[in-house]
Image (tube, rainbow, N blue to C red):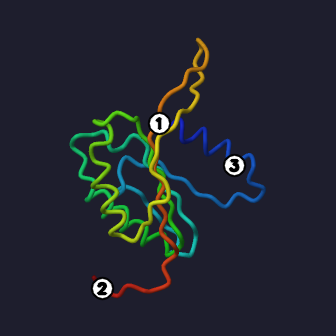
Amino acid sequence: MCRLGERLALAAAEFDESPQSTRQWAAGIASVSWESAPSWRPVIVIASYLLASPTLDAEQLIVELDDLLAKLGRGPVTVLYTNSTRPDANRSFPAFRAVLENKGFDLYADDTDEIEIARLSGTRLRELRYALFRRQRRDTLRLGD
């Protein structure tokens, strides 16, 4: 997934006349290091094929993500979730969705579709589950829980 993400980031950079994006690959949310001051920058989080793990604690994942987002700033946040359409691969999605909504995210899309995958033997269609969440920039300063 990191190789695919890196290819996508490099391809997007070709169209960015004044690059202002930052990306980081980390084994876990807690290992993301951020040295820039918080700002109003928009953030995009891509959670691909993450919820297929039977041991993943979706609630804890979002709590850690929300803590990281507070370090990054108070700008708008978009979360793109992609996965296989298999039910077992989406077993944690209801909890993931509920915690995101509890943290102020709105669901904009939750659907399935097909994408073309290029292989040496030709292209083939693959079903894909996706969901798009968005939280507007935060205008109110939280002073406690």
**Residue 7 in the image, given as x and y percentages of width and height:** 60, 38
Contact, mark 3 vs mark 1 (Cβ under 8 Å): no
The span from disc 2 to disc 1 (Cα, nearest Å) is 39 Å
Counting residues from the start of the chain, the first of labels 3 and 1 encountered is 3
For mark 1, what is the residue?
A: 128
Callout 1, which amino acid? Leu
Contact, mark 2 vs mark 1 (Cβ under 8 Å): no
Q: In this view, does 38 lie above or below 52?
A: below
Callout 2, which amino acid? Gly
Give me the residue at 30% from left, 37% from top: 87
Give me the residue at 31% from left, 61% from top: 98
Under circle 2, the secondary element is loop
**Residue 137 in the image, given as x and y percentages of width and height:** 52, 75
Per the rendering, the mark at residue 144 is 2
Task: Give the side of residue 119 with respect to residue 106, left or right.
Answer: right
For mark 3, what is the residue?
A: 13
Work out whether residue 44 or residue 88 is closer to the camera in this orientation and state it: 88
**Residue 112 in the image, given as x and y percentages of width and height:** 47, 40
The span from disc 3 to disc 1 (Cα, nearest Å) is 25 Å
- Furthest residue in direction right, as rendered: 17
Callout 3, which amino acid? Ala
Contact, mark 2 vs mark 3 (Cβ under 8 Å): no
Under circle 3, the secondary element is helix
Counting residues from the start of the chain, the first of labels 2 and 3 encountered is 3
The span from disc 2 to disc 3 (Cα, nearest Å) is 38 Å
